[in-house]
Amino acid sequence: MTSTTFIIKSIFKSLNNQNVLLLIIAFICTFPIIAQEDDDPLGTEVVNIVKPYTPTISDAFKIKETPVLNDSISEQKKQVEYSIFSVPVASTFTPSKGKAQTVEKAKKIKLFDNYATLGFGNYTTVLGELYSNFQLSRTDNVGVFFSHNSAMGDIDDVKASTDFFDTQLDLSYSSRQRDASYGLDVGVEHQSYNWYGINDAFNFQPDAFFDDTDFVQNYFSGYIGGTIDVENSFFDKATAKLRYLSDSYESSEINFTAMPEFAFPVADNKFKIGIDLDYLSGSFYEGLFDSETQNYSQFNAGILPSIDIITDDLSLSLGAKVYVGMDTENSETDFYVYPNVLASYSVVDELVIAYAGIEGGLTQNTFYDFKEVNPFISPTLNIAPTSKNYDAFLGLKGKLSSAIAYNVRGSYSNENDKSLFKANSYTPSPLDTEGYKYGNSFNVIYDDINTLSFFGELKAEISPNFNIGVNGTFNSYNTDNQQEAWNLPSLQATVFSTFNITEALYGGVSLFYVGERKDFDDNLLIDNIVADSGVVTLDGYVDANVHVGYRLSERLSIFMKGSNLIGGNYEKWYNYPVQGIQVLGGATYKFDW
């Protein structure tokens, strides 16, 4: 079908019959008019097609009326009628309005800036403490701490005086600024002890001998130190301390330490460089003549680079320690390199954390550190550093439950020139009868030692008012030159607990066990005759301690302490029995200026 025919049919289709008839009549009437123009000659015409014909199909008209079904079979919808059959049900439920649960607010604890403690006990024991804090401004504080502990009672079967006292005064200043915080500490200390552990071979001396002989050793020390911590800087922090020590026998020692630390971000990790500086100089006067003075001077400098890598489950620190040690008194220089690798991995979140590492270091031994461990040393020591070549360890820690935590670890270490305390022999002479030369003092010797160690700890917080814990360490020593690892115990254990019985009544218990130790006696007494020398064994001991306190008010409380309740006069050091049962009572008062 041509497009013209389609258009005509469309026109006729859109018109009704009446309109078609009128259109035909009009067409016939015009035909004669057209025919009268026969005189006009027919000519040719040119038709120029400007645009090709592009037909389109218009949208079909939509039928808007609903079609009628002409099916021969049609069914009429039936009307459905329904009803609800309701039966009442008995119920005892009675709804009530909800009520918000009230939360009991904890009583706000009043904090005080100052406190004073004073206590007295048997063996003429006196305990005193005073701490005071002064806030100079919102960022600056000054603190003062004074402490005194002394006892002047005698110990059974000991002829020499056993008096001792320890008095200390510390001052501190701290400041917290916007980008840095720093502090300054100054302190002095006076300690007095008696070398009362006279060797049994010479304990037969009359009482006049012990009254006339000066067995007293006094330590005088002072220090000044400071710390600084900087935010948002490659210079992270630094500590420094200068300490001086002297005693009753013209001994003196100066020790300066400084440890600056720098930190740099590397990608998402932290790279740190630490510097360890340690200078030591001192002297011991060992006789009646200046030529018998023993001097020592050492300087250790180390650099400690490390990088910390921390992910969700892994924490890793990779580093090393490089030291140069100079014995300036003997013109000797040594170089040391140590590993410093630490890692921990969370196997099960908070429940099982595995950790391991291998580390070492150079430790500068000092006269001050030795007397802090054993105050009965003689002022005739050989001071040298200890090199821990490595200490490799592996362990597990975590929680058995929300209230029980554990930690187990095994380690193996190798140390050169590890310090050991060993009893001195009897060495007095008619011209030189110092109080430490009656087999009643200790020397420091050094040996290369390998140590296999196992440690375990378990802590339980039964409730906010009661917790308990236990830990133990087993050590096995392998010495190179010495017959034994003198005065080092193979087994140590501790049981501890703190509790609150009521809001006012509180207390704690601690139980210490130290296993057997070995020492050496050059003057062993056999049948009241000095006949031999050899290794002696110090029995293990248990030291039980209990303390209870009662708060009379938010400011005032009283306390009672019991020490060595079941251990008796055990020997902590060879020939040095300790005080028996010790009971101390006192009060603590808190206040503000």
Image (cartoon, rainbow, N blue to C red):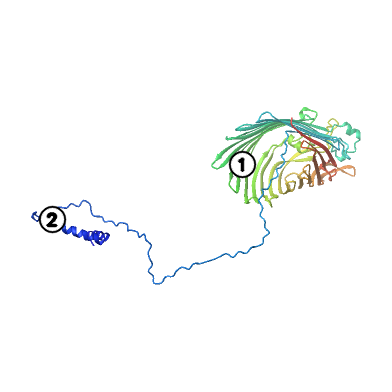
Q: Give the camera-side residue of 43 and 449.
A: 43
**Which quadrant holds residue 518?**
top right
Q: Amino acid at mark 1?
A: Ala
Q: Are marks 1 and 2 in contact (CB under 8 Å)?
A: no
Which mark lies nearer to you, 1 or 2?
2
Callout 1: SS:
strand
Q: Residues within 10 Å of mark 2 (few under 14, many from 20)?
A: few
Q: Residue at x 89, y 33 (%)?
A: 209
Q: Residue at x 27, y 59 (%)?
A: 14
Is 554 on the left or on the right of 228, as rendered?
right
Q: Is residue 398 visible?
A: yes
The disc, 1 or 2, on the residue closer to the chain's N-terminal end is: 2
Q: Position of residue 89 (x, y in %)?
A: 65, 62
Q: Position of residue 509 (x, y in %)?
A: 79, 45
Number of numbered callouts drawn: 2
Q: Which residue extends farthest top? A: 290
Is 318 on the left or on the right of 383, as rendered?
left
Q: Residues within 10 Å of mark 1 (few under 14, many from 20)?
A: some
Quarter of the picture containing the C terminus is top right
**Which quadrant holds residue 142?**
top right
Q: Amino acid at mark 2?
A: Ile
Q: Position of residue 74 (x, y in %)?
A: 42, 70
Q: Residue at x 59, y 45 (%)?
A: 310
Q: Give the camera-side residue of 583 and 27.
A: 27
Callout 2: SS:
helix
Q: Position of residue 400 (x, y in %)?
A: 69, 52
Quarter of the picture containing the N terminus is bottom left
Residue highlighted by disc 1 = 320
Residue highlighted by disc 2 = 33
